[in-house]
Image (spheres, rainbow, N blue to C red):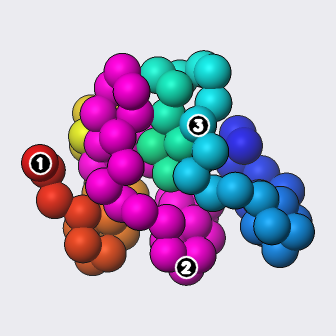
Amino acid sequence: MYGHESAVELLLRNGAIIDARGAHIGRGDALYVASMQGFDKIVELLLRKDVDVHTRSSRLGLALKGASSGGHNKVVELLLANGAIDK
């Protein structure tokens, strides 16, 4: 992902599984990784696809925690506006 919005848009248009988990970065899904890295544009794209804001990384917790730990306030605001809560 690394902030490449056009690549993410292409993947989403072609049916990419948005809740698939990777082997890296705490085994998080796309929302967790984008949130942790502060990629607000990608977070917006994923939220428009109705990604589950409460999916947990198997090691590191919720996307909201990843965003707040990294000081990514815009991402935190996006997640909260879309129903994320710190469980």
Task: Indicate which disc, 2 or 1, sits on the residue closer to the N terminus.
Answer: 2
Q: Which residue is mark 1?
A: 87
- Dot 2 and dot 1 residues touching (CB under 8 Å): no
Residue 72 visible in this rendered orientation of the protein? no
Residue 85: % across, % down: 16, 59
Quarter that holds the N terminus: top right
Q: Please give the name of the residue rendered at 39% of the width and 27% of the height, measured from the top-left corner.
A: 58
51 lies above or below 19: below
Q: Which mark is residue 48?
A: 2
Q: Which residue is mark 3?
A: 21
Span shown in magenta: 35-64
Residue 60 part of the magenta segment: yes
Give the distance between the C-alpha atoms of the residues marked 3 and 1, in whole angstroms. Answer: 20 Å
Could you tell me the amino acid type at mark 1?
Lys
Residue lying farthest to the left in this orientation: 87
Give the distance between the C-alpha atoms of the residues marked 3 and 2, in whole angstroms. Answer: 19 Å
Task: Indicate which disc, 3 or 2, sits on the residue closer to the N terminus.
Answer: 3
52 lies above or below 87: below
Could you tell me the amino acid type at mark 2?
Arg
Q: Please give the name of the residue rendered at 57% of the width and 66% of the height, measured from the top-left corner.
A: 46
- Dot 3 and dot 2 residues touching (CB under 8 Å): no
Q: Left or right: 8 with respect to 84?
A: right
Q: Which mark is nearer the camera, 3 or 2? A: 3
